[in-house]
């Protein structure tokens, strides 16, 4: 007996469109590389699967062609809200910031700099602030070895492993204030 679904896919000419429609569905992601990631928008931290095209050769740039919810995730079980479902547009937007920008003191314009220059500037700023703000002893003469003039903020996509490394880094500096929007 023909099912309601099969009936809906059968044309007036007497043949089924099911195999053709299945082929179209398969073609969409059949040649993609799948990478697991996390939606960057909010603290829910929904898991996503990013589908990209490109053979990963050095001179080939991969392009993201589809992003969907990860059904294996206990956080979202494959679902995404309207922001998460639009992630592909975010990734492929020509307005997306992909390089560090620097605005010199007093300057009005931002200038693109390399990651090496950005690391150098951040390291220099942290070193200068730490030299100025490191406290070895508190007012009662107790040894505290803490840094009071820098705070650190995390993000919703920070995993346990990233937070572990961040903690190593900030405790190494003596840095205590830390906030993270992640509620995973
Ligand atoms: S898909 Fe929606 S609910 Fe999930 S992390 Fe992204 S913005 Fe938050």
Image: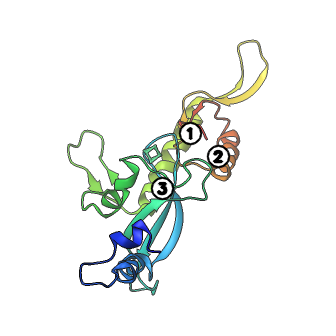
Which secondary structure, mark 2? helix
The numbered dot on residue 163 is 2
Proximity of marks 2 and 1: CB atoms separated by less than 8 Å: yes
Mark-to-mark CA distance, 1 and 3: 28 Å
Mark-to-mark CA distance, 2 and 1: 10 Å
Residue at 25% x, 57% y is 95
Relative to 38, does residue 66 appear above or below in the rendering?
Answer: below
Q: Where is residue 8 drawn, in percent x and y?
A: 33, 69
Residue at 48% x, 49% y is 122
Q: Where is residue 12 drawn, in percent x and y?
A: 24, 79
**Which residue is farthest top?**
140
Residue at 58% x, 47% y is 75
Which secondary structure, mark 1? loop
Mark found first going from the N terminus, 2 or 3:
3
Which secondary structure, mark 3? helix
Relative to 130, does residue 40 appear above or below in the rendering?
Answer: below
Q: List the residue tagged with mark 3.
A: 120
Q: List the residue tagged with mark 1.
A: 182
Mark found first going from the N terminus, 1 or 3:
3
The answer to which image quadrant residue 173 occupies is top right
Regarding residue 21, the answer to whether it shows in the image is yes
Q: Label 1: how many residues lie within 10 Å, few (<14), some (14-19) or many (20+)?
A: some
- Would residue 69 appear left or right of 94 to someone viewing this image? right
């Amino acid at each position: 007996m023909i099912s309601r679904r099969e009936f809906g896919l059968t044309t007036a000419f007497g043949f089924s469109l099911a195999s053709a429609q299945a082929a179209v569905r398969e073609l969409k992601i059949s040649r993609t590389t799948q990478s697991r990631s996390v939606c960057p928008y909010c603290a829910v931290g929904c898991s996503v699967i990013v589908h990209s095209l490109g053979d990963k050769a050095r001179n080939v740039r991969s392009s993201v062609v589809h992003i969907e919810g990860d059904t294996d995730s206990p956080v979202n079980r494959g679902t995404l809200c309207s922001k998460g479902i639009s992630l592909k547009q975010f990734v492929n937007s020509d307005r997306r910031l992909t390089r560090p920008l620097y605005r010199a003191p007093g300057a009005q314009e931002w200038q693109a700099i390399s990651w090496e220059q950005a690391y150098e500037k951040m390291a220099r700023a942290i070193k200068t602030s730490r030299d100025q703000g490191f406290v070895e002893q508190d007012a009662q003469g107790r040894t505290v070895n803490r840094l009071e003039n820098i705070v650190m903020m995390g993000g919703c996509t920070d995993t346990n492993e990233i937070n572990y490394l961040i903690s190593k880094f900030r405790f190494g500096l003596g840095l205590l204030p830390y906030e993270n929007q992640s509620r995973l």
